[in-house]
Image (cartoon, rainbow, N blue to C red):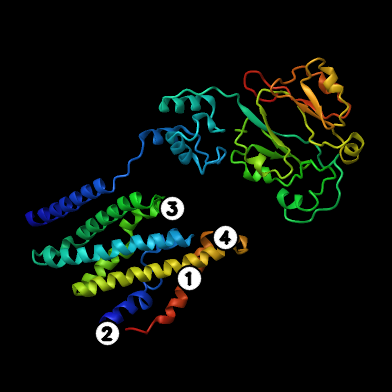
Amino acid sequence: MLAPTALLTGMGLVSGLGLAVAAKFFAVEVDPRQEQIADILPGANCGGCGLAGCSDFASAVVAGSISPADCPVADDETAQLIAEIMGVTVEAKDPQVAIVLCQGNIDIAAKKYRYNGLASCASASLLGGGDKGCGQGCLGLADCQRVCGFDAVEMTAEGIAKIIPERCTACGQCITACPKDIIKLIPANSEIHVLCSSHEKGAAAKKNCGTFCLGCKKCEKFYGEIPQIKIDSFLALVDYNNPPTNPEVAEVCPADAIVYLPKDKQTGRYV
Amino acid sequence: MNILLLVISAIFVNNFVLARFLGICPFLGVSKKLSTALGMTGAVMFVMTLASIASWLVYHLLLKPFDLVFLQTISFILIIASMVQLVELALQKLSPPLYRSLGIFLPLITTNCAVLGCAVLVVQNDYSLIQTTVFALAAAVGFGLSLVLFSGIREVLALADTPKSFRGTAIALVTAGILSLSFMGFAGLVK
């Protein structure tokens, strides 16, 4: 009875002591703040911050090479918490969402040719910019949906991408993935949008699509002195630093390019 | 000559993974990438060799003289567990990327039947200390060989257009079977 107990205890002690010495020798010093920050980050590892993942972001914050507010997915509260851990202050940033600036679905958009290749926007756009007549139209092959880590992109039955703002975290993955460059980040509380990206002149744009901006400047004039929508080379652009508020502008647009998407003031969701 | 036979036997004929069914878990688990497989091979080689030598010493210098052979399993496991812990500590310090890519399979070496199997086989076959060292090293090389071969195939396989019903674990197991089949060609080379 005594011998086996003594033997096992002895062996346990020897290996335990050996490991204790080894642990000292191989000790890796990790800043405890790094773990704290990694714990409160969203943990989606989306790469929206430009780093390899959330733990990389945490170590970059601790190293001071990135600001706690630079995680595009985390809300303000999280950014403040991280800032508290680091003992710095960050300015609150307005929440943003992505939006697809195109409504040229298969019913209204003309096609140049029949695309029969790989079901990917990147591949389709290599062939003369894609099958859509309009050079800035959504190709509808869901590259943005596939990269979205938050299930925030919906492909409508009419074959264009639509972002679900409640789920969008503004990580920017879809913006990088879109070969047509028609997805933009906008303030989450804005309600009036020009859902067209075509810089074509009116007649040319009309040939390709049922809803388009022809650059008629009616919206620009609607707002008078300081226009909240401005025309830039035949395309109306919403000034999101000073977002338009009067929804009647949508009715002024002769080609239905301007859309009023009202949002619930409390939840920020589309009504 | 005897030693050479031992080496050939442990690497090819009685390959731990492909002929003896030992150490299948890391064989399937960390064989997706060649570099990770090489790292795992290194870790297993270290643990297997040292654990076998330590087990041999404990068995012949402590267990046998004091008539405590019934403690064989628990004392071997104790030795293996502390070896693995040591490797884990060292890897975390020396190669964090490898440590991260091995993930759960590093602590799982503790319960890797190839390691314990090696320690037990050495005692069962009544090897001398030199034979033990050579056998453990050769067994680990055999384990590494199958792991590296397999991960090379899987890397190519990842790019191939595999039928949908075969994808993932299914094709990995089928591949492992075919690889084992080819190693059966060594049977009879050494008795």
Q: Earlier in the sequence, mark 3 or mark 4?
A: 3
Q: Secondary structure at mark 2?
A: loop
Crowdedness near tag 2: few (<14), some (14–19) or many (≥20) residues, C-alpha within 10 Å = few
Which residue is outermost to the top?
A225
Residue A13 vertical position relative to residue A64 in the rendered view, above or below: below
Tell me which numbered mark, 3 or 1, is placed earlier along the sequence: 3
Badge 1 amino acid: Gly
- Is disc 1 in contact with disc 2, using a CB cutoff of under 8 Å? no
Chain of the residue where label 1 is placed in the rendered structure:
B
Question: Measured from the top left, where is residue A27 in percent x and y?
Answer: 29, 45
Is the residue at mark 3 from the same chain as the one at mark 1?
yes
| Residue that numbered label 4 is attached to | B167
Q: Is residue B5 left or right of residue A173?
A: left
Marking on residue B1 = 2
Q: How far is the residue under mark 2 from the one under mark 3?
A: 40 Å
Chain at numbered mark 4: B
Which of the marked residues, 2 or 3, is nearer the chain's N terminus?
A: 2
Residue B76 location in percent, x, y? Answer: 22, 60
In this view, A145 is above or below B179: above
Q: What residue is drawn where x is 45% and y is 32%?
A: A40
| Residue B49 is at least partly visible in this image | yes
Report the disc number at residue B101.
Answer: 3
- Residue B188 coordinates in the image, percent (x, y): 37, 84
Answer left or right for B135 relative to A187: left
